Image (cartoon, coloured by chain):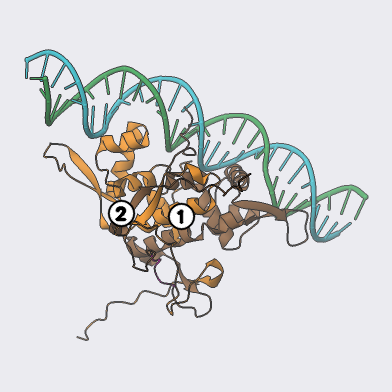
Chain colours: A orange, B brown, C green, D cyan
Amino acid sequence: MKRTSLAGDSCPVARALDVFGDWWSLLIIRDASLGRRRFGEFQESLGLAKNILASRLRTLVERGILKMIPASDGSAYQEYVLTPKGRGIFPILVALRQWSEEFDEHPDEIATIMVDRDKGKPVKKLVLYAQDGRVLDAADTALKPRPAAKRARRVPA
Amino acid sequence: MKRTSLAGDSCPVARALDVFGDWWSLLIIRDASLGRRRFGEFQESLGLAKNILASRLRTLVERGILKMIPASDGSAYQEYVLTPKGRGIFPILVALRQWSEEFDEHPDEIATIMVDRDKGKPVKKLVLYAQDGRVLDAADTALKPRPAAKRARRVPA
DNA sequence: CAATGATGGTTGCATTATTAAACTTCATTG
DNA sequence: CAATGAAGTTTAATAATGCAACCATCATTG
């Protein structure tokens, strides 16, 4: 009667949610991508119970989203920073943000906008392109069975 | 001691997660975007308990992600279909999918790839652009306080 | 048109997860 | 070296989840 795991699912959306699809993980990842790295920083920022935070940090490290490094201030404590796999979640955060910007009932309650660092201008909406450069929306897409992986070509003996 | 709500949060990521950030909602939305619309279809596809499904469908309708319509087969049952607000979640599903495609440990277990319907070719990765057309990654972005909303200009009395 | 089965739920109970608070341990500071 | 703080762990209560069984309605068949 455990909470059902999505780990073995064949759907890539489900597989991603299995890794960081719980109530807190994405917010921890958001905080990490904003530069927060200490246990206390996460705890204060998110206001979640410390045991839950400890548990989430542990599994995010196990799953290769975060890694622990010695604290940058020279203290004996450690810090949690995103791995490349963790930084790869950035587009998901952007997509979530843009959905709220577009559909939230109370957009006035949204405190920040994402801008490009150089110019300080708001970023544009994420765009999905076809290989030939056409812009696609949901109706223009379909799902196909994944082709069998190509093996590394073996040099004939 | 209720589960902490993210509804009043000022972060748009948290606000989105408050709407569909639980364990099942995004998968229901994924199914809906694949054309599933009947209670039984969702239940069979997701394998979740019926009471949980009923509860999720109810809140997704409440929150304007799904709407109930009379069944298309003429029967007296009803169906759940995405609203525009629900269809707006599509880029988030794409981003999740692409993260798994790029970082999953066992990509061979992913059953499907997203293609453009016309040509049948895989779609490209989502791209974030600056207003001037430069491609941005996480390090090229920053968050700024949201400017106060412009009031509707009032005609002087 | 009564019986049977499928659809779309609800209810009750067992299990799991989340919370808050107290407690521990080690490191740093005064 | 006592006191404070950081980073957790433990404990107990509450909330969410999962499972199974039940129920109501609609649909189909004899």
Specify the principal SS of the magenta part.
loop
Residue in the foreground of this view, choosing between B13 and A76: B13
Task: Tell me where residue D10 sits by quadrant.
Answer: top left
Q: How far across and down, in percent of the image, does residue B52 sit?
A: 57, 43
Q: Residue at x 22, y 86 (%)?
A: A156
Q: Mark 2 points at which residue?
A: A86
Q: Which residue is drawn at 42% across and 58% down?
A: B96
Judged from this view, the residue extending furthest toward the front is B157
Drawn side of residue A118 relative to residue A146, left or right: left
Q: How far across and down, in percent of the image, does residue A59 sit?
A: 31, 45
Q: Is mark 2 on a helix, strand or loop?
A: helix
Which chain is home to disc 1? A
- Magenta stretch bounds: B123-127
In the image, what residue type sits under mark 1?
Gln
Q: Which mark is residue A156?
A: none
Drawn side of residue B35 relative to residue A34, left or right: right
Which chain is home to disc 2? A
Q: Nearer the viewer, mark 2 or mark 1?
A: 1
Sequence-wise, the earlier of marks 2 and 1 is 2
Drawn side of residue B72 relative to residue A114, left or right: right
The image quadrant where one finds the C terminus of chain B is: top right
- Is residue A118 magenta-colored? no
Task: Tell me where residue B101 sits by quadrant.
Answer: bottom left
Judged from this view, the residue extending furthest toward the bottom is A156
